[in-house]
Image (cartoon, grey):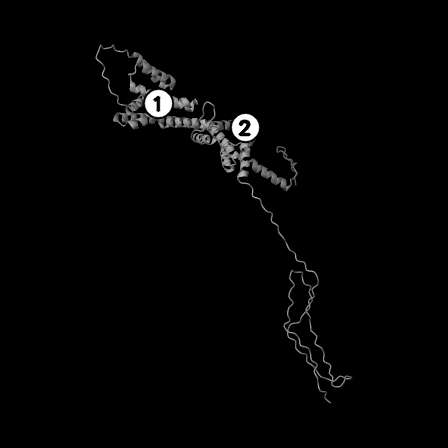
Amino acid sequence: MQHREPDETKPITVNNQHPAPQNSTKRQESTKTVDRTPTSKIIRVLQRNKTLLIILVLAILLFTFTIITGSFAGYFSGKQALLTMESAQVESTIYEQFDLGVQNLLGGDLEIARQRFEYVLSQDPSYPGAADRMAEVLTILYATATPTLIPPTGTPSPTADPRPAQDLFAKAEGLLANWEWNAAIDTLVGLRKENPSYQTARVDGMLYLALRYRGIEKILKEHNLEGGIYDLALAENFAPLDVEAGNARNWARLYIIGSSFWEAYPEQAAYYFGQVASAAPYLRDASGWTAKDRYRASLIQYGDQLARNEDWCTAQVQYEIAYSIRADDNILKKIEEVSLECSPPTATIPSVTITFTPTITGSITVSPTLTGTIFPPQLTLSPTPGSPTGTQVVPTPTPTDPPPTTEPSPTTEIPPTPEPSETPSPTEEPTATPTP
């Protein structure tokens, strides 16, 4: 057998690894299987290249920001489009109502035309031609027939120059369009003094509109109730007031009437201010008191007056209404005081419970009684030695088992003694004749 030398061209592998336990082998196998997943490969790549990780995070943030920005942009764009659509719809409605009002005016339906022009002016007071048409309708509706005066014959007078009146009229139209009521009224009054016969119907209609709007503004915005009522009264000379102007004038009148009863007659003041507070709670006069505050203060004053007269329940109602308008600790204290007087607490009588416990003293003796049937014993007659002649001894019967004697439990009643069903008769000694 020849000895073969190792091949020097082949590398010699030396296994220095020791055999691992079974558990470690399984852990390595599971690690290898996890490392082979695509997610783990991506994580290892990102861990090695931090720049790529940063780029990926920035891309996600940019994508999220783009989505959010687009959402907000779409929301605001849709909202703006909706507002534009609503505005266009309102303009279309105003134009349609004005056109229909003109048709009603030409057709003779003056009342319907007036309503349409009022709607147009309420939506857009500066709508071109609406004020003129409104004045024309009002002039026709409420015109009064006046006799025509025949001018006396004489020397003809020179024709007046109409240019100043035209300028004043155009100026008044511009002031009305800009809601400058004071300047418009002054201009129209000057025009009327300058030329009373110039565009009479239209000037009257313009005066009506200016006085009407100025009166409402004085009542609701400037808190000048008397001045607003006066302007509306002047406007009513040209045409009847509409619903809005009539309500404003009524509120102002009620407020002034309630102020006349202030602190003197709180019941009447609460009545009038309550009507104003329900419709226009923030209406006020030059003092700054709103109708709601005056109503609340009048209720408190009225409640104090009722409490002084010892009308507690009615006073409680007034205080509770004032407290519902605005909570206050002082009013709450008054409510508690008058409620105690209105509904005083009922006195309760304490109930007394008497318990009788019977006590039995002494001793109770229970005698057992035999019940049942007692059979007489069988007697055997036999002579007894040593006994006298003719005498037999008879044994006395003895009960077998007497009932046990039990101690009675203490009760309130003594149990009745049971009656014996049968009483044993005394035993008679038989007399036997001795046998020889």
The residue labelled by disc 1 is 235
Image coordinates of residue 109 in percent, x first then y, are 27, 28
Q: Quadrant of the N terminus?
A: top right
Name the side, left or right, on which 295 lies relative to 172: right
Q: Residue furthest bottom?
A: 436
Image coordinates of residue 190 in percent, x first then y, are 34, 14
Q: Residue furthest right?
A: 386
Badge 1: how crowded within 10 Å, few (<14), some, or many (20+)? many
Asked whether residue 171 appears in the rendered view, the answer is no
**Which one is in front in this view, the residue at disc 1 or the one at disc 2?**
1
The residue labelled by disc 2 is 53
Name the side, left or right, on which 434 lies relative to 349: right
Q: Residue furthest left?
A: 153
Badge 2: how crowded within 10 Å, few (<14), some, or many (20+)? some
> Could you give the CA–CA distance between mark 1 and mark 2, rounded to whole angstroms?
79 Å
Identified by mark 1, the residue type is Ala
415 and 3: which is toward the camera:
415
Residue 346 falls in image quadrant: top right
